[in-house]
Image (cartoon, grey):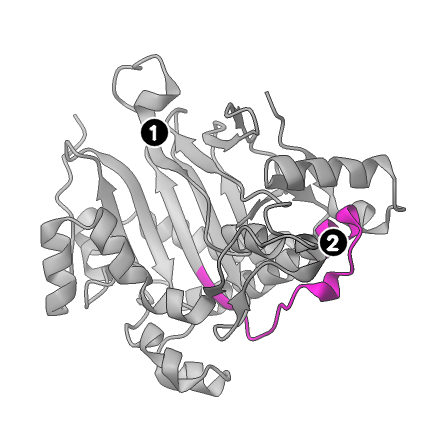
């Protein structure tokens, strides 16, 4: 079974070509698409300053949190709960868009054709007036880690990081996932207690911080088996997304992962999904295609983003959720109260 390595990012970036450190990075990037990094340069207070107010928000009574749902029913804004097919809570989530409105996006240099992405406002709880600044600092720090990890991967596979057309401003999203304590009889297999189904992110890289008392995050190896990603104090988890796999014509794996239930307290994660600028067209780069035909089609970041909510609702949306979004009103899922 494949093990997700723990990489000292500073040391690995300074390692000589052909070193064991870079060999470990290369193997992980090519086979799994998931690493943990320490010595990553993100100050602990940047993480704590974001997580602590989020802790307090998620600890509020449900009746209070319901008022923090997106006022327009947007699935990627504000608070929401995610029940399974039986109405049992699988996931509680708080999502933050990159900009609060089109005017802010315009001021940041985002072309007008993508302003509809920011027409649905973020929800900033009045109980936590410092949350927005903390979220901005968290996002910026994690984008910096993503850029450094891309540079590390380039060194590990022997290419100049400049071959990747990563332009700014980056398009990002920030999501907090809170997984409940498993209170039901143990079914005996991980497959029967999944809280987040297996998938690969559609980013270039996703940078995540996890906390909790059990290793619920799992990564898939090239043999199809699953390995737990342990909760390592101070470490960040970095997932390669489908766009990085596209750029490298499949040489670098998109990290498939899932979350299983367990533990005596909830498991919490907060992830920043990092894409290049919205007008970027991601397609296999000549350095990775050679004389053959590319294995991936071009992917327009902005056009895909504009259709992401509709794509999500078509696959996962429940009728009442879709209706709420179409009508521009809040959606709060019915969840069975724990016994």
**Which label's residue is closer to the chain start, 2 or 1?**
2
Q: Name the residue rendered at 17%, 34% in the picture.
A: 85
Kindly identify the residue that appears in the image at 63 percent across and 40 percent down. 35
Between 283 and 52, the one nearer to me in the picture: 283
Residue for badge 1: 194
Asked whether, in this view, residue 76 is left or right of residue 289, the answer is left
SS at mark 2 in the image = helix
Residue range in magenta is 151-173
The local secondary structure at tag 1 comes to: strand
Give the CA distance from mark 2 to mark 1. Answer: 34 Å
The percent position of residue 88, horizontal first and vertical second, equals 19, 33
How many labels, in total?
A: 2
Q: Quadrant of residue 76?
A: bottom left
- Locate the C terminus and report the quarter of the image it occupies: top left
- Residue 307: image location, x then y, percent: 31, 65
Magenta includes 154? yes
4 vs 270: above or below: above
| In the image: residue 63, left or right of residue 301 | left
Give percent across and percent down for residue 75. 26, 58
Residue 71 in view here = yes
Quarter of image, res 64:
bottom left
Image quadrant holding the N terminus, namely top right
Residue 181 appears in the picture as rendered: no
Q: Which labelled disc corresponds to residue 60?
A: none
Disc 2 crowd rating (10 Å Cα; few below 14, some 14-19, many 20+) is: some
Image quadrant of residue 336? top left
Q: Please tell me whether mark 2 or mark 1 is closer to you in this view.
A: 2
Observer-nearest residue: 233 or 192?
192
Residue at which label 2 appears: 154
Residue lying at the far top of the rendered structure = 188
């Amino acid at each position: 079974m494949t093990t997700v390595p723990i990489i000292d990012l500073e040391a690995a970036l300074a390692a000589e070509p052909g070193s064991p450190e870079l060999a470990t990075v290369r193997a992980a990037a090519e086979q799994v698409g998931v690493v943990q990094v320490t010595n990553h340069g993100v100050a602990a207070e940047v993480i704590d300053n974001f997580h602590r107010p989020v802790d307090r928000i998620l600890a509020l009574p449900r009746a209070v949190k319901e008022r923090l749902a997106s006022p327009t029913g947007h699935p990627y804004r504000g608070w929401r709960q995610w029940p399974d097919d039986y109405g049992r809570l699988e996931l509680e989530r708080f999502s933050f868009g990159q900009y609060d409105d089109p005017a802010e996006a315009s001021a940041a240099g985002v072309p007008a054709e993508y302003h509809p992405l920011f027409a649905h406002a973020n929800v900033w709880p009045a109980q936590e007036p410092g949350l927005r600044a903390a979220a901005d600092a968290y996002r910026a720090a994690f984008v910096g880690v993503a850029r450094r990890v891309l540079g590390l991967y380039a060194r590990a596979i022997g290419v100049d990081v400049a071959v990747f057309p990563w332009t700014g401003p980056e398009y990002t999203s920030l999501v907090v996932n809170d997984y409940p304590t498993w209170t039901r009889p143990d079914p005996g297999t991980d497959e029967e207690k999944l809280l987040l189904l297996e998938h690969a992110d559609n980013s270039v890289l996703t940078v995540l911080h996890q906390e909790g008392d059990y290793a619920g995050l799992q990564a898939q190896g090239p043999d199809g088996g699953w390995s737990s990603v342990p909760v390592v104090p101070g470490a960040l988890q970095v997932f390669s997304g489908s766009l990085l796999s596209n750029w490298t014509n499949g040489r670098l794996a998109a990290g498939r992962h899932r979350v299983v239930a367990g533990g005596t307290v909830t498991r919490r994660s907060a992830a920043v999904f990092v894409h290049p600028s919205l007008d970027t067209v991601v397609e296999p780069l000549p350095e990775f295609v050679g004389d053959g035909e590319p294995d991936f089609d071009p992917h327009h970041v902005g056009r895909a983003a504009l259709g992401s909510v509709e794509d999500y609702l078509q696959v996962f949306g429940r009728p009442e959720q879709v209706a709420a979004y179409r009508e521009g009103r809040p959606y709060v899922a019915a969840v069975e109260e724990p016994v």
